[in-house]
Image (tube, grey):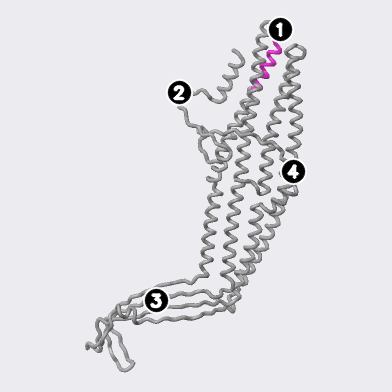
Amino acid sequence: MSYKLVYAVVIAALFNTNMSGAQTATVRVLTLQECVNMAIERSTAVLKGNNNVAYAGTQILAAYGQYLPNLAAGAGYNYNRGNNFFASTGPELVNENRSQFNYQLTSSINIFSGYYNYSNFKAAKLSKDISNLTLELAKQQIELDITQSYLQVILDRKIVGLDSSNLATSLKREDQLTVLTDVGRKAKTDLYQQQAQTSSNKLLLINAISRMENDKILLFQKLRIDSTDNYEIADIAIDDNPNAARYGNKDELLQEALQNRADLQSAQLTTQMTDWNIKKYRSGYLPQVSLAAGFFNNGAYFNSLSVNGESADVGSQQTIPTQLYKYTYGTVGINATWNIFDKYFTKSNVAGAKIAADNARIDLQDTRTGVLSNIRQAHNDYRNAVQQMETVGVGYNAAQKAYEAVSGQYKEGATDFITESNAQLVFLQAAQNKIQTSVNMMLQKKILDFYAGTIKN
């Protein structure tokens, strides 16, 4: 059996490509951007974040509504029947059958609320801005997480390709050694050693494929995809250009982070919101003034009336529709209230708001320190990735040339199998290191974008 056929059989077995009797399913190939979009749409953090933004919008509307006058309408109907004893001018027993009705339309508006409404409105607007920033940060974190998982699958796939190529080389050499051993040109020990190396290379490939499949499952889990059979990951070009003009200047990245980081902006707005909450609760020390107006109507209609057992004349009664508009009156007034002593309610609220404001400033300082530390650490990792790229590039070129030279010498019988096998292993490790550093460079730039607050989703 030739090495190509053996190689094909091994790969087919590893990837479970024996599809006899199986139905062909439609496979959707997902790009990196599609994975990011899918994760953002399905993320619990984003779904809750959208709800929080919507709720904050309702709070703004409620706070704005406190500037508007209210309008309340009411109506009532009473039916009275029975005996009543009156003794103001003499003992009289009155039996009445009467219908009573009333309606009113009232409205009031706050003229001065001790700045409570204004402070509450400003705090509500800041709360919505904070909710939007929290939502944006959640989306950015999702993009970085999905990008990292996606690149891990791409790296696994390229490692599988290198291990597959390495196995093909070993299978080819094993075929050649089998023929040379049969004709007595090579010792049996070389064939046995090559068979052992081929087995080891197969194991490397098996493990590489297993890692790739597990990392794909993890990525699909983050995308909330139940089955991995109907989806595949699209290949992408690895952007391993260091781009020192964008990422080489640490001071510029620090300034970008201070200006753009959503969590830092959220912490800054939180301190402003807590300051407005202090002003809101301090309004309890001030008087409140409101303007109220009302429109009222009262009416009644006697169905029957008797006094001391004799029917009484109720006189001329206006009809109910006439009374509905004729017996009306209105009132307008200004009300002022001032709590002289509210059992320390306002004082305790103000004290609590001050503590919350102090905690918010502590959190702001911690967030700012964390932002700067994130950039410094990520920039160090970026510089390390640049140095790795340079070092690995030199090592890869040297390993490739060494392997080509040793392989040629082995074919001519100028070197032994151990030397040739070691050169192959060194070249494989150099190739793996090269692709790992390339993927790592792309990831480090994405991490810097995230910590600088400039990552785009």
The residue under label 3 is 104
CA gap between label 1 and label 4 equals 57 Å
Res 309 quadrant in image:
bottom left
Magenta-colored stretch includes residue 196: yes
CA gap between label 4 and label 3 equals 74 Å
Residue in the picture at 63% in, 68% down: 278
Between residues 388 and 174, which one lies in front from this camera angle? 388
Q: Crowdedness of circle 3 by 10 Å Cα count: few (<14), some, many (20+)? A: some
CA gap between label 3 and label 2 equals 81 Å
The residue under label 2 is 21
Residue in the picture at 22% in, 87% down: 311
Residue in the picture at 63% in, 34% down: 237
The residue under label 4 is 248
First to last magenta residue range: 186-201
Closer to the chain start, of discs 4 and 3, is: 3
Secondary structure category for the residue under label 3: strand
CA gap between label 1 and label 2 equals 46 Å
The residue under label 1 is 185
